[in-house]
Image (cartoon, rainbow, N blue to C red):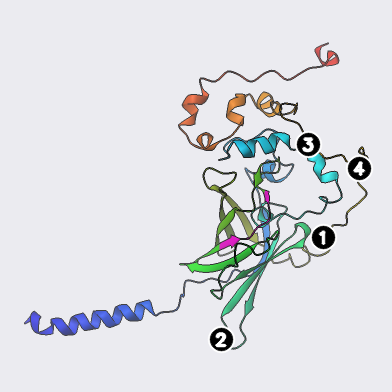
Amino acid sequence: MFSAYRPKILAFLLLLSLGLLSRPAFAQVDLSGYWGQKMSEDQPERGPGPEIGDYTGMPINAADRARADAWDAQKWEMVEHECDPHPSDYAPRGPADMRIEAEIDPFTQQVLAWDMTTRYLNNDRTIYMDNRPHPSENAPHTWQGFSTGEWEGDMLKVTTTHLKEGWVRRNGLARSERGTLTEYFIRNDEFFTLVSYVNDPVYLTEPFVRTSNWILDLGGAGRLRGNVCIPSLEADHPHGYVAHHLPGQNPWLTEFASVHGIPVEATRGGAETMYPEYQEKLAKMPAPPKLHQDKETKK
């Protein structure tokens, strides 16, 4: 008897499955609003900034390590760099109170794009939602890059290419112009989480993953205004000065290890230092050198 109804049952199941496939993505959520930054265990990284020579847990290669060793913070005293904005992969790290607004088609009511603004230098970024392709590899690169979004359940996946050279940590660790950024925007009521990972064939051996968090700020409408950078006079340096350290001449590279009692080798980074198994190797490493003390301190 069942065999007589089998074709009808199969046809019904087929129609049901087609109906489910054609349903609109009801899981999409509204990301718009003013979002206040939440910082906890990573506050030192985002507040005063990372210490010189701290590459711990970073999946960098030898080229990136060499660039960071040569880096000098006096770079930011030079007029051409004083107003460099944070690129898209670093802008949400801070200070990054954030505003997200939807651009909506007046006829279809579909979201065409998300406009995202972070507080530092009022970084403005557009995430296109209309399935447009990314530009040619030869197209200009910018601080914000070119971003497109698509929904994966109730998470917005954003892919960004065409970024100018930037940084993965503010102590000289670089990210090349060939790097790409993938993000997941996740809203849970008044909480907002951004999971990002950077792939860079030039300086990273594995993806670099970070998470950042915000909370809905109903009074944050005026906090993103007036944050304009105007270059000031350049600090007093000899003519032609370029902030740098020659190889082997940066005196600060082991200070982080000495202050925190971490073997110097472990602070030099590399993908190996990200994993729990590294603790076995860490236990066999020599202690870091003691901090240099001047005569007054020794007395």
Residue underneath mark 2: 108
Q: State the CA–CA distance, disc 3 to disc 4.
A: 15 Å
Which structural element holds mark 2? loop
Front position among marks 3 and 4: 3
Residue underneath mark 1: 227
What's the amino acid at mark 4?
Ala
Density class for disc 3 (Cα within 10 Å; few <14, some 14-19, many ≥20) is some
Residue 10 higher or lower than 46, as above or below: below
Work out whether mark 2 precedes mark 3 in sequence or the reverse, and give the earlier one. 2
Density class for disc 2 (Cα within 10 Å; few <14, some 14-19, many ≥20) is few
Work out whether mark 4 precedes mark 2 in sequence or the reverse, and give the earlier one. 2
Q: State the CA–CA distance, disc 3 to disc 1.
A: 29 Å
Q: Which mark is residue 275?
A: none
Residue 233: x and y, percent? 93, 49
Residue 299: x and y, percent? 83, 11
Density class for disc 1 (Cα within 10 Å; few <14, some 14-19, many ≥20) is few
Label 4 close to label 2 by CB (< 8 Å): no
Residue underneath mark 4: 235
What's the amino acid at mark 1?
Asn
Q: Nearer the viewer, residue 153 or 177?
A: 177
Label 3 close to label 1 by CB (< 8 Å): no
What's the amino acid at mark 3?
His
Residue 81 higher or lower than 151, as above or below: above
Front position among marks 4 and 1: 4
Q: State the CA–CA distance, disc 4 to disc 1.
A: 22 Å
Residue at 28% of width from left, 83% of height from top?
15
Which structural element holds mark 4? loop
Q: Nearer the viewer, residue 118 or 199?
A: 199
